[in-house]
Amino acid sequence: MELTHLPPDTSPADISDHLRQHGYAIVLDAVPAATMDALYEEARPYIEGSAAGRDEYDGRFTRRTGQLVARCRTARELVMHPTVVGAVQHFLSHVTAVQLHLTQLISISPGESQQKLHRDQMAFDFFPFPADYHAQCNTMWALTDFTVANGATHILPGTSAVPDDVALAMPGGQATMPKGSVLFYDGKVLHSGGSNTSSGDRIGVNLTYSVGWVRQEENQFLAVPPDVARTLDDDLLKMLGYQQGAFALGYVGDQQDPLAFLRGESGKTKLIHEVTQKTADHQAFVDELGVK
């Protein structure tokens, strides 16, 4: 089946709504191709130094290169792209804080077979999240053109809340898109990397986001050393995890704010209005049910 493509001026709310309905959204030409070329030049030595996968799932002809915030300035722009951040925050608006979950360049080389279909939220120890609760929101940027031949990502739309035995029989399609486009997909939808029968690499920039109360897949506090972190702006640092992940999560020492601690400043964590409101709303819900 052919997947839907959205124009670059699609609003974050509309992207989020499409993602919630179908499990994916593809936004064409979100950044100029030159931006992706710049990222490739920054990342090339690290890509070349990355080993191929360990098994069929990782891909024996696939290289995965992380630590992109520390290594590549252009990756920071993609992490904080306004349309992406807006769509992610809209999609994960049920939580107090959103954080960066992982950064990874995925290079699928010729000869690679199709990856096993899977759901990314299995990373959380296969925890059975409710069907309507999303713990993450993922993006895959096209650093090269994504084609059927070179391994464009397979997506099975509508499988986010469907059991595996039913979902695996549902029709899917490949997220073909030109360089500079971005695929959004949730943590529940069945998907996989494609087989590469072409003569060149298919390179995607996998930047994923999660709710603030779960452990990040890529440890951002080690991937971005403190001396590098101190050179970054506050908004990016908060996305990396230098913020309260929820009520009482993420402070340092004597309840110090993590961002202030990094900056060598004093200051305790503060209750966020949204946290207080969410707590009040939850208590009202509990009271209405008569739960004690």
Image (tube, rainbow, N blue to C red):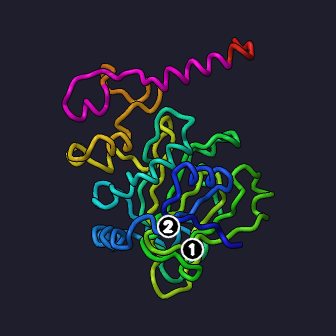
Q: Where does residue 34 sit, x and y in percent of width and height?
A: 33, 73
Name the amino acid type tagged 1.
Thr
Q: Where is 276 relative to 223, above or below?
A: above
Identify the residue shown where x is 77% and y is 64%: 170
Camera sees residue 168: yes
Whether label 1 touches label 2, CB < 8 Å: no
Identify the residue shown where x is 49% and y is 34%: 213
* Front one among 289 and 56: 289
Give the residue at mark 1. Answer: 176
Q: Where is 176 relative to 126, above or below?
A: below
| Quarter of the figure that contains the N terminus | bottom right
Identify the residue shown where x is 36% and y is 46%: 220
SS for callout 1: loop
Question: The magenta stretch spans which residues?
Answer: 257-285
Give the residue at mark 2. Answer: 54
3D distance between C-alphas at marks 1 and 2: 26 Å
Structural crowding at the residue carrying mark 2, measured as other residues with C-alpha within 10 Å and reported as few (<14), some (14–19) or many (≥20): few
> Magenta segment, principal secondary structure?
helix
Residue 230 part of the magenta-drawn span: no
Identify the residue shown where x is 54% and y is 58%: 184
* Front one among 90 and 63: 90
* Front one among 125 and 14: 14
| Quarter of the figure that contains the C terminus | top right
Camera sees residue 61: no
Q: Nearer the viewer, mark 1 or mark 2?
A: 1
Q: Where does residue 27 sit, x and y in percent of width and height?
A: 52, 63
Q: Where does residue 289 sit, x and y in percent of width and height?
A: 74, 17
Residue 72 sits in quarter: bottom left
Q: Earlier in the sequence, mark 1 or mark 2?
A: 2
Q: How many marks?
A: 2
Relative to 76, 162 lies left or right: right
Q: Where does residue 257 sit, x and y in percent of width and height?
A: 31, 27
